[in-house]
Image (cartoon, rainbow, N blue to C red):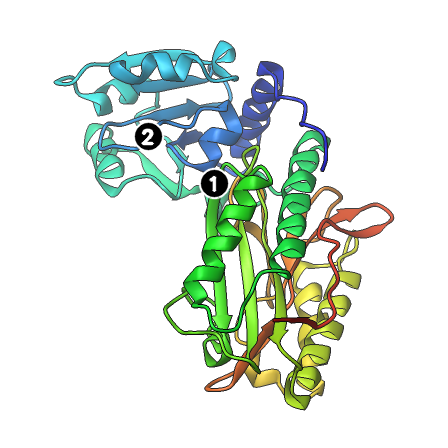
Amino acid sequence: MSTEPVPFTSDDYAARMRRSADAARAAGLDGLLVTPGPELVWLTGYRPTAITERLTVLVLTPDSEPTLVVPALERSDAESAAGAPTVRMVDWLDGDDPFARTGTLVAPDATMGISDSAWAMHLLGLQDALPGTSYRSLTQSLPMLRAVKDPAELARLDAAAQAADATYEQILHVPFAGRRETDVAADLARLLREHGHEQVDFTVVGSGPNGANPHHEAGDRVIEVGDAVVLDFGGLRHGYGSDTSRTVSVGEPSARLREVHEVVRLAQHAGVEAARVGAACQDVDRAARRLIADAGYGDRFIHRTGHGIGTTTHEPPYMIEGEEQPLEPGMCFSVEPGVYLPGELGVRIEDIVTVDASGPRRLNTTDRSLRVVE
């Protein structure tokens, strides 16, 4: 396994906040309002222990120091965050008006970017306190804010991918036939934690016809000999995401499964090879989709080819038709084509890929051939 990553410093967080405030100005915004969620973690290192109805918001404007408005009872937790030394704290007590308090930090006619995860009641409260303001979602305004990872972030993503790979290598040796999908899903969750994940986000185990549902929740179906089983699992390690998919055969695979799996394997390879500096995100999708369509399964590839990954397992950029964002060094995303045959089977193969100046680099390196399990 990889060594422990170097901790982010208060200087790292301060640089991110400055960059974000400058990006807001360039996007025509007067500032950013960042509520609990991935952006707040990325900007300050602060992840509230409980997200409640009490307003917590980081106010970033180009010409003022970063200010975190926080409930008084949570101030000590916020002050322990790695980025806290570079943030001014403004607390409020139960019974105070946190929206009026926040309003003193925002111009009365400002256009602000606000976290996608902000509660509607908080946005409405801010609008009441500042009726002249307007708001745009962060994803709409600054979709690439967190897309390019620095070396320390890539080290965390590498470590998360290695942990997911180790999990896959071990899951190949547990029994499948005669057990429920939920049993195998529990094995995946246990192994991810054993390999250093502090959070398990999903453990998809889609056996037989259930594999034709890309987001199938593991259920009580008993896995049978002859099933194809889609395994898709991941979570957070050191605060950064893992996400990988492989499809296995319980016992000897059918000719149909071998055919579909080979189509998906070649499509996944084509998608990865298209992930080069300067290519558009949609070029990755087109490369994978073209191969599947040429094999006659175009209408059975029913989702985008990939998504960005970082402090969450799904974030921009997205590998999808119509996304013309050029790929840059340091971008990190999944390449995960699939073919889904209702009532029969599904196949998906997924790796996390980062864009290097010299070409694409897979963070997941486990065997992508069709493996047989018992």
Kind of residue sitting beneath label 2: Asp
Kind of residue sitting beneath label 1: Gln
* Residue 88 position in % (x across, y down): 42, 11
The answer to whether residue 77 is seen in the rendering is yes
Q: Does 243 appear above or below 137?
A: below
**In the image, what residue occupies the spot 50% across and 36% down?**
198
First in sequence: mark 1 or mark 2? 2
**Secondary element type, mark 1:** strand
Q: Nearer the viewer, residue 113 or 160?
A: 160
- Count of numbered marks: 2
Q: CA distance from mark 1 to mark 2?
A: 41 Å
**In the image, what residue occupies the spot 43% across and 74% down?**
222
Q: Nearer the viewer, residue 103 or 8?
A: 8
Drawn side of residue 179 relative to residue 192, left or right: left
User: What numbered label is drawn on residue 109?
Assistant: 2
Quarter of the image that includes the C terminus: bottom right
Callout in the foreground (1, 2): 1
**Secondary element type, mark 2:** loop
**In the image, what residue occupies the spot 69% across and 83% down?**
258
The residue that disc 1 covers is 199
**In the image, what residue occupies the spot 47% across and 58% down?**
185
Q: Does 2 appear above or below 61?
A: below
* Residue 336 position in % (x across, y down): 63, 64
